[in-house]
Each structure stands twice: as structure tokens, then as C-alpha cells.
Amino acid sequence: MLAEMRIQGLGVIEDALLELHPGFTVVTGETGAGKTMVVTGLHLLSGGRAEASKVRAGAGKATVEGRFAGVAGERALEIIADAGADTDTDGSVIALRSVGADGRSRAHLGGRSVPVGVLAELSEQLLAVHGQNDQLRLLRPAEQRAVIDRFAGADVAVPLAEYRRVRAEWLAAVTELTERTTRSRELAQQADLLRHGLAEIEAVQPAPGEDAELTEQIKRLAAVDELRTAAGAAQAALSGAPDGDPDAPGALGTVGEARRRLSGAEDSVLRELEPRLAEAEALIADVGGELAGYLEQLDADPQHLERVLARQAELKKLTRKYAADVDGVLAWAEEARQRLSTMDISEEALAELAARRDALAEELAGLAIRVSGARAIAATELAEAITAELAGLAMGQAEIQVTVHRRPTDEGDPHALRVHGELLHAGPDGVDDVELLLRAHSGAPPLPVHKAASGGELSRVMLAIEVVLAHADTVQTLVFDEVDAGVGGRAAVEIGRRLARLARSHQVLVVTHLPQVAAFADRHLVVDKGTAEGVTRSGMRVLEQHERVQELARMLAGMAETETGRAHAEELLAAAEADKRAAGGAPAGEGRRRRR
């Protein structure tokens, strides 16, 4: 969970520390005080986009630092380990994000500098931020399909992953068959050029690194006389004159004589030098032998030089046409063979490729049916769960329907797939379109959510969806940014009750303007705004019980200074506490959680 977060130099917030409750924490404050900067800070900590405009005027940079305590989960721990981040003994890790006034951003995890993407990956495992933008996003068909997939879990994820793998192979086969069919003449010409090149290379049969070896041979053969003289003189210096002249014994004889003289000496110091001379004698003998072998192999035959030069000329013809050296020519030949294998436009090859395409299409259709079936089952369960949540949010007559229907297409669609005789569009997420419909009351027709719901109702529908999906989420911390906008009265109380029950299984952080929601919090943070020397500054503090009464009274239409306002606030707090004490058993939605 997110134990605490510090924000410095962000928007109107100069320096604020949020100490979050493991359960339900609420953030309130007057309009413009900086409540939204809390969510902005969380977005930055989650690897979101950095904007220089968010840096506080006069501050060099904005910094957001968060401490995640008790980090668990295989993927989260893997991300931390891969980053080389340090963790505390209690398993907590500190994440930090800074944004300069020039817009440049830096990220750190566990004291190590990391790419911003690492924070994004980690935050996906640890927290989920839901705001009004999420409400708008959930109205898109693709997002509604993602809602079902998230709710269904492995029931959809497993066949969908297999569907995507087979789809990639199917599309590759379709593309290749189309290319071979429509570009037959061009491919035939390319194939002829490749075969001609391979024939040239195979006729020469170059060996890897052969050009470099020939260059070295040519240098040696061109200077054979000089090399023979040098090697012969060196051998004579080591082994002595070839005629055995005692006046020119060579280094080997001289060292041998020195060794014999020392070996017979009576002095121990001189005798200790004898083994070293023996080593030198052996080394000189080895070098002399190698020089003798070199001289025997040294070929001064002019015809051999001509043969080597001719071979070099053959290789140069290939390197001028196909690559810079022989190794490159061999690589070109291998690539040419691979390309030729995909250029076969014979009737047999095209028939074989068409058969593979059809087999993959049949397999893909079967997987698409599996995905659709799993989504249909999940849609029924999801609709029932959301409808039940709406009943607890003062929308007892409302009913949610989640429809899953296949997306028809025509022959002109390059991704057209025939499924049970019907031509469907096979997209990366399957062949389904998903839509959330709302029946406002028993006599109303089901309509798309954004058309059937008012602003307040839409907020409640989205909150119900988020509450239901929360139990399918693996993240521990859930953040709600004014998802209660446009709601009041009894519905606001029900939202507060739902969030409090959700906080029994998750850490919940809510930014709100509703006192009915704030009353249910386990910890109440308020953003205070003040002005000094013409500069607006905001900070944050935890409210004590008597301060909560005053803040709730202020939120109740600015009644902080009246007895009536305080009495109403005390009544709200007492009712919320009583409700939380009375709420036994499983948290909201727990009984409907799907088993995976």
C-alpha cells in the first residue's frame, strides 16, 4: 500500500505530506486549494506525463515522493529487483519523480535512477487511479470490452492470448499469399537475379576468411627472398653456422657452454643459476626449430604466387558485387537462399500456402468463438453485479445490461474471418463489440449509458463499475478523484458507505467535495490555502475529531460557524461510524466475486 506521499513545488502546494490510512483516507479542501494536485502527484509518481506548467511559480522543480509499504506480488518484486532498487527491512520501497521548470523529468526507485517507464510498470501493480477522465474513457467501446476482459480474468485472457498468436500467423500467411499472387512477375525476376548470384558464389566456393588469408600469403610470397634471408640469419645466430664452424657456435652453443660451467661449480649461488640457463637453452632450441620449419615451408615458386593471385582475383569479383569481404558474401548467399524460399510462385507452393492460410483461419475462428463465449458468460455476471451495486447507490430501479455481439464485415476487409458461415472482422481483441446499456427504470428502454444517465447517475454507474472491478483487481491501492461529482443527498451517503466497505479489502484514497462521503473516512486530510506577501500557498494536515466536525460543517454549504452546521456534521459522523460498526461479513461485492 501507499503509506505516505510528499509533494513539493507542485501547483499551489509548496510542501505537503500525506500520511495515508491502510483503509479509507479522504482529502477535502476549498475550491482552488489544491486537492487535484494530490491526484496530479499520483499520476507523476505513476510515470504519467510531466508538464512544466505544473511546477510551482518560483520553484526550480516539483517533486513527488511516495513510500510503498509491504510490497508483495511476483511482478512488482521483479520490477524492483531488475531496477537494482533498495528496499527497507519491512519490504517498503521509495519512489520519487521530479519535474524541472524546463519540463525535464527524472525518476528514482529505491535510491536508484531509473527510466520513467519503470515507475509506470510498478504503479500498474500497486495502485489504480480513477477519475472523471476514466468515466469518459469507459464510455468508449474498446474500454467497455476491456472492462469485461478484466472482470472475466483468465477465462478470457488465456484464449485471447492464443487467439492473438494464431492471428499473427494467419495475417502473415494471408499477406504472403497475396504478395506472391499479385507480384508474380516481379518476384520471378527477383528470384532469377538471386539464383544467378548464388550460382556465381557457389562456382567460386569461397571459404570464411579466405580473402584475409590470401592477402597474407601474397605478402609472404612477394617478399620470399627477404624473409628467407632474415629467417636464415636468425637461425644461424641461434643455432650456429650451418657448416659447424667452432668459431661461430651460435646462441644455443654459448648458453650450453655457460650451463656446463655453472653446473660443475662448487658455489651454491652459481649452481642455482644453472636451471634458468637450462630453460633459456630449451627456449632457444624451440625457436631455432620453428625457424628451420618456416624455412622449409617457405615457397619461392613463382607459379604458386600466380595461382594465389588468380584466386584472389576470383574473390574480388564477388566482393565487388555482393559485399565488402568474403564473410559478407557468404552472409548474402544465406539471405538469398532464405528469400528464395518465400518467392516460390509455382502452383504447388501457392496451393500449400493457401492450405496453411485456411487451416490457420479455421483455428482462429475456433479461438474467436471461445473468447466470445467467455465474454458472454462474464457479461451476464458483470451486469448482475453492477445492477446490485446500483441498488445500494439509490438507483434501485436501474438495470445494467452488458451486450456482446459480433462485428460483421464484408469481403473487402483484409481482416475478414468466416466464423460459422458469417463474415466477421477479426481485430486484435477478437470479433466482438461490447456495449454497456442502462435501463433507468422498468418501463424505460435500454440505452447506451451516456444517453440514459444524468450526470449524477453516470457518476454512480461508473463508481459501481469500479467497485465491482476492484475485486477483480490485484492492486491494493485505489484512488478516486471526485467520482461523486453531480451527486448529493441520500445517493452521496450511499457512495460513502460503498467506499468505506471497499476500504475493508483495499486501501482507498478519495478526493471529494461531499461531506456525506468524507464522514465515512478512517483518516481525513484537508488542503489548507493561505496567502502571504501576495503568494498563494497550500499545505496539508490530518484533522482531529473536533476539526473534522468543523470541516464537514464548512462543506455543508459553509455552515462551519453555526451550531446548526456543527450539529449536522456531528450527526453525519455518528451515523457513518454506526454504519461502519454495523457492517459485518464480506465487503460490498465480495459475495459476487468470480472464482478463477
Image (cartoon, rainbow, N blue to C red):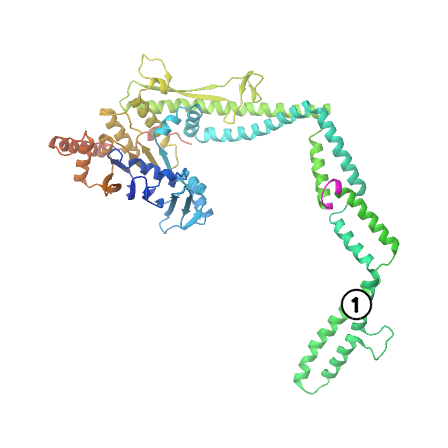
Where is residue 67, by image quadrant? top left
**Horizontally, is 130 left or right of 263 in the view?**
left
Residue 149's x, y, as percent? 44, 28
Image quadrant occupied by the C terminus: top left
- Asked whether 325 falls inside the magenta stretch, the response is yes
At x 25% / y 33%, what residue is drawn? 31
The extreme top residue here reads: 443
User: Is residue 303 depicted above or below 286 in this figure?
Assistant: above
Picture quarter containing residue 437? top left
Residue at 59 percent of width and 27 percent of height: 171
**Residue for badge 1:** 289
Question: Could one spot residue 131 in this view of the protein?
Answer: yes
What segment carries the magenta color? 320-326
Badge 1: how crowded within 10 Å, few (<14), some, or many (20+)?
A: some
Whole-percent x and y of residue 583?
Answer: 24, 32
Looking at the figure, which quarter contains the N terminus?
top left
The residue sitting at the front extreme is 534
Can residue 504 be seen in the rendering of this structure?
Answer: no
Residue 352: percent from left, percent from top? 68, 25
Q: Is residue 26 above or below residue 383?
A: below
Q: Decide if residue 249 is on the left or right side of residue 55.
A: right
Q: Which of these two is toward me, 131 or 153?
A: 131
> Quick check: 446 above or below 54?
above
